[in-house]
Image (tube, rainbow, N blue to C red):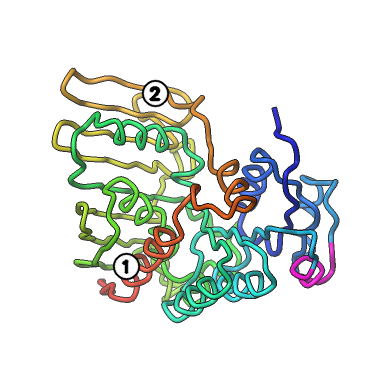
Amino acid sequence: MLETRRLRFGVVGMNHGHIYGMVDAMVRGGGELVSFHAHEPDLAAAFARRYPAAQQVSDERAIVEDRSIQLVLSSITPNERGPLGIRVMEHGKDYVVDKPGVTTLAQLSDVRRVQAATRRIYSIVYSERFENGATIHAGELVQAGAIGTVIQTAGFGPHRVHPPDRPDWFWDPARHGGIICDIGSHQFDQFLHFTGSTSGEIVASQVRNVRHPEHPAFQDFGDSMVRGNGGTGYIRVDWFTPDGLPTWGDTRLTILGTDGYIEVRKNVDLAGRAGGNHLFIADRTGVRYIDCSAVDLPFGRQLVDDVLNRTDTAMAQAHCFLATELALVAQQKARMVP
């Protein structure tokens, strides 16, 4: 059952399909989608069909300057997300943006400065954690001490390319930030969350372009090692999902503890169970499988609460920015290998 509408929100920019999950999360949490803006007529038309009650406006200012709107969502082209967020915060509104939330360290510095000055929320939707029941339940198990003290996380983010579906900006790292900045941001978020790290450093990182010589700047493989004050992490991301896999990517997370480990298979179980949200745990008592498809997804509700109550429950602002910083530094330091 949908909650009573508790706040009004708008959407500016929808260049990635993640915007639909973001909107649905806010609606589940009690938000009312009021209006939207996009430069691209085809994207706006598809969005209007999905949300016919929302008003399309011809200028973002009709949303950013609307005093009745408390929150703005966006999945605009990645290199535009930071500057848009600054405009939103400077107009006294909170901001929820698709990952990557910014694409350069200079942008991150500007966003941090404005967020500190305005005290608005700048939230990046790391959907691999917030919108996946198995990952949420893994966090509950870790909090309960099921595998002891976490030592390391290993996160894998394979994706499918399918070039005909990709816009021009997809092939340009200057516009999407590079493979580690983009896809890898999910894994850095999970590394911090599960190890409890509040600081971190990049040990090593590398990227490759294996299959796309026609786009010489593109990166289809990247990995990184990270060390935090609560544990270590390994991250691998790629664009090599095979055609035969029945989903866009076999995203996986392994959490190693002193008394056991958890493996999350977010989208597919190669052993044959249907759907996603699969969790496997080996602990002091044995080995078991947990179906997490019915686990509650609290992010939207928590974020709406944070907007209304000026709290920090959906995701700590410091965590949000640190996950972004680690991804950006790993991207910047990455060695391009043949």
Query: Is 109 located above or below residue 220 in the figure?
Result: below
Considering only order in the chain, which callout, 2 or 1, is on the residue closer to the N terminus?
1
Which amino acid, by three-letter code, is at mark 1? Arg
Judge by depth and name the residue closer to the eye, 91 or 205: 91
- Crowding at dot 1, Cα within 10 Å, few <14 / some 14-19 / many 20+, comes out as some
Query: Is 263 located above or below residue 197 in the figure?
Result: above
Helix, strand, or loop for circle 2? loop
The answer to whether 115 appears left or right of 37 in the picture is left
- Residue bearing mark 2: 272
- Residue bearing mark 1: 208
Query: Which residue corresponds to the image point at 39% horizontal and 50% vertical from the top-left?
Result: 158
How many marks the image carries: the answer is: 2
Judge by depth and name the residue closer to the eye, 114 or 291: 114
Query: Which residue corresponds to the image point at 67% horizontal and 48% vertical from the top-left?
Result: 23
- Crowding at dot 2, Cα within 10 Å, few <14 / some 14-19 / many 20+, comes out as few
Query: Which residue corresponds to the image point at 61% horizontal and 62% vertical from the top-left?
Result: 95
Q: Bounds of the magenta span?
A: 57-65
